[in-house]
Amino acid sequence: MPKILILRFSSIGDIVLTTPVIRCIKQQVPGAEVHFCTKQGFRTILENNPHIDKVHVLQGSLKELVQELQAENFDYVVDLHNNLRTRVIKFRLGKPNKSFNKLNYEKWLMVNLKLSMLPDVHIVDRYLEAASALGVKDDGNGLDYFIPAKDEVALESLPEPFRQGYTAFAIGAQHFTKRLPTKRIVELCERLQRPVVLLGGKEDAATGNEIASYFDAALGKAGTVIYNACGQYNLNQSASLVRQAEQVVSHDTGLMHIAAAFGKDIISVWGNTIPEFGMYPYRTSYKVLEVKGLSCRPCSKIGYSKCPKGHFKCMWDISFDAV
């Protein structure tokens, strides 16, 4: 029975994007025992996945984690993070392994010289290639996300206007330059003309209240009603609300990939990053909102705490006419 270790420490979206690799290894490698190693904070994404036999988490020192992994005596390591930490782990384990191609050089050229040498390949396909030596092939079944029964949110628990259908809007993002300004979120919600559930963490609750207050003051005249769910639900519960939504609006962030796992129709909003980096919604219907041809975009492969140019045109100038 081959014992296989998959490495990916962060973050929400990136881990969700590894799920086809997890499933395909478990289903296509005879007798495979699949282990996954991540950070403690992301354990909840993986612990309900039926294709994973054991989750290992980094919560103390890297040395302690390595000792735990060495005791498992793995046969093969699939590195879907490919950073210094995972290289140390692979060296210490001394087992056959393969890392995915991060395309760092191609991304550098795009960010710094605006020279596109990026292949038209989704990151999921690059993840799968890292497992190809195991005989694994894409099964065409897209992403997975498993919600435990205790975290399913009943529609009846939502305010009455949202029980017959709603759009879920994931208003948060890890970096400022990947988030629409609040005024623009309000504008986009006005375009939707329907009930909208705002999703995000506790750090997004104040923004959600500001958006909801605008529509409360409009007394329904805007045609849009808002429920600010930011900070009220854990990740699995937020995923449940995404699963039950009729449509999802999201920045380039984790809930966008969770929405793709449920095959949702997605409006995908892009600021300083670009879909060409290979992390657009995977195998689901989606529409991209972005400013094409902006000379300073992309300014980063990840994001910043403020616009380096000061004008933030990549978000302020997005047209919502297609919504």
Image (cartoon, rainbow, N blue to C red):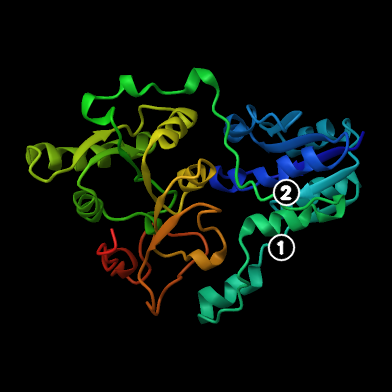
Label 2 or label 1, whichever comes before in sequence order: 2
Amino acid, disc 2? Arg
| Residue at numbered disc 1 | 101
Amino acid, disc 1? Asn
- Residue 105, quarter of the rendered image: bottom right
Residue nearer the viewer, 6 or 176: 6
> Is 219 situated above or below 121?
above
Q: CA distance from mark 2 to mark 1?
A: 16 Å
> Is 37 situated above or below 121?
above
Counting labels gives 2
Q: Residues within 10 Å of mark 1 (few under 14, many from 20)?
A: some
- The C terminus appears in which quarter of the rendering? bottom left
Locate residue 64, reporting x and y percent. Answer: 78, 32
Residue nearer the viewer, 62 or 316: 316
> Is 74 situated above or below 135?
above
Q: In the image, is 149 to the left or to the right of 156?
A: right
Locate residue 262, reporting x and y percent. Answer: 51, 40
Q: Residues within 10 Å of mark 2 (few under 14, many from 20)?
A: few
- The N terminus appears in which quarter of the rendering? top right
Locate residue 202, reporting x and y percent. Answer: 36, 33
Look at the image and tell me whether residue 83 can be seen: no
Q: In the image, is 280 to the left or to the right of 161?
A: right
Residue nearer the viewer, 170 or 262: 262
Identify the element where label 2 is drawn.
helix
Q: In the image, is 24 to the left or to the right of 236?
A: right
- Residue 204, quarter of the rendered image: top left
Q: In the image, what residue occupies the spot 72% across and 35% down?
A: 61
Identify the element where label 1 is drawn.
loop
| Residue at numbered disc 2 | 85
Q: In the image, what residue occupies the spot 71% across and 49% down?
A: 139
- Residue 268, quarter of the rendered image: bottom left
